[in-house]
Structures are given as C-alpha cells and as structure tokens.
Image: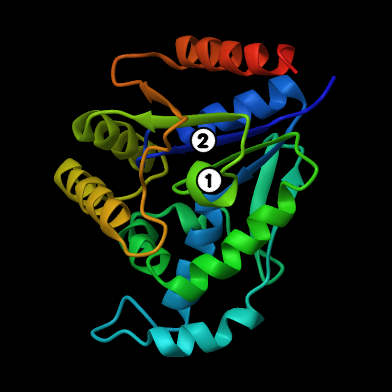
Amino acid sequence: MRKITIAIDGYSSTGKSTIAKQLAKALGYIYVDTGAMYRAVTLFAMRSEFIGTESSNIEALVKLLPKINLKFVYNETVGFAEMYLNNENVEKEIRTLEVSRNVSQIATIEEVRYKLVEMQKKMGQEKGIVMDGRDIGTVVFPEAELKLFMTASAEKRATRRYKELLDKGDDVTFEEVLKNVEQRDYIDSHREFSPLKLADDAIEFDNSDMGLEEQFERILGYAQRVINKL
C-alpha cells in the first residue's frame, strides 16, 4: 500500500498532537511534533538568557543555531518520540507555560524557521509521516495528500490547556492561560514569515464540541479515503 504525507496545522491547544499521534499509530506512520522543535529552541534561548529577561538578544541566538541539535527519540514507555535538545531529554521542560509564553516570539525569527523547516522536509522525504504544526500544509509539505486545519474557540482551547497544566502541578490561573492562547493566536497569524493560515486545499476541522474518539474516527476516515484512491 502506498503511503501519503499528512499535514496537520491549526491553532494552539486544538489537540493537533493528540490526533496526530493516534493517526500515526493507526496507520503505522512516523509522527513528528514540529511544535516541540520550536519549543526546544525556545528553551535553549531562555536558558541562555537570550529571551525571557528585560532585553532580548536574538542576534546571539541566531549565531548559535548551528550548535543546536534536535532529535526525536522513541520512548516505549509512553508510546511516542520525545524531544531531545543537545542529547538531553527536554520533553517535560518544553511543555511549561513559561515556554508557551515565549515560543511564538522564537517562531517569528526567519533563521529559526529556515533551520527547522529544512529539518522537517528531510524527515518527510519517504512519506508515511504525520506532521503537525503551524505551516506544514503551506510551507513544509505544500504537496501533502491530506491537509487538516484544526480549530476551536479560544475559551475551549484555554480550558483544555488549563486542565493539562493543573494535572502537571503547575501553578497557573485560567485567565493567564486564556491570555496566552489569544496572544499566540495573534502572533502566529500575523508573523511575517510562514504565518498560520488555512491552505486552499486543507480540510478545516472545528473540534470545539467534539470528543477525542469522534475526532479520531472522522480524521482516520479522511486518511483512509485518500490512501484508497492511490
């Protein structure tokens, strides 16, 4: 059976990663979370104090981009690949609200996007991949056989994210999370390089009032129909 490329874009906290993982597992495809890559670069910048302080030093970050090594390592215990930054497992660290507050700023940097997009394109050369992010169907894989654009109301997404952070033990308020979701929406949609937008041939998928099982079944159906036509 021929394999396809599946590109999943959309707003933050729409469940892109969850659906993408399920889809990849069901089809026997590789799953790539591009958001984790941008979060890892953000974590590097924060640790180096290039951002997150009173002043930013983006030029210093750009100079050190060749020193940033990113890779996904499959963890059998959790059932998915985790992000490694310079050989350190940073999967937990990159999911904090502090990183979320800064990741959109890093994602606007042209040099960062160029480096990561090139890495992502290489990952998908053999097809059989499910990749989620912000510009997968428009920039990374414009020829993908199946493109999805995930969306939901800001309030619904903030509620999901708030529960996730509480479950991890983070001390946050719903208002903080909602503000972060709205700010990320604006920055992602208005950045100069590779802004978040709906590809002309993408399926817009609003999951505001949809459970995970229903979402998965519908999206798996889309994928199977495309594969069966090959």
Q: Which quadrant holds the N terminus? A: top right
* Residue with the most extreme right position: 1
Q: Amino acid at mark 2?
A: Ile
- Marks 1 and 2, how far apart in space? 7 Å
Question: Which badge, 1 or 2, comes first in the chain's sequence?
Answer: 2
| Residue 96 horizontal/vertical position (percent) | 40, 55
Q: Which of 152 and 95 lies nearest the eye of the viewer?
A: 152
Residues under numbered marks 1 and 2 in contact, where contact means CB atoms less than 8 Å apart = yes
Quarter occupied by residue 154 = top left
Q: Which mark is residue 60?
A: none
Residue 102 higher or lower than 8, as above or below: below
Q: Which of 159 and 61 lies nearest the eye of the viewer?
A: 61
Mark 1, residues whose alpha carbon is within 10 Å: few (<14), some, or many (≥20)?
Answer: many
Which type of secondary structure does the marked residue at label 2 adopt?
Answer: strand
Quarter occupied by residue 159 = top left
Q: Which quadrant holds the C terminus? A: top right
| Residue 108 horizontal/vertical position (percent) | 37, 66
Which type of secondary structure does the marked residue at label 1 adopt?
Answer: helix
* 46 relative to 101 in the view: left or right: right
- The residue singled out by tag 2 in the image is 8
Q: Amino acid at mark 1?
A: Ile
Q: Can the viewer see residue 89 in this picture?
A: no
* Residue with the most extreme left position: 175
Residue 32 higher or lower than 188, as above or below: above
Q: Residue at x 40, y 68 (%)?
A: 106
Mark 2, residues whose alpha carbon is within 10 Å: few (<14), some, or many (≥20)?
Answer: many
Q: How is the image coloured?
A: rainbow
| Residue 180 horizontal/vertical position (percent) | 23, 51
Q: Which mark is residue 136?
A: 1
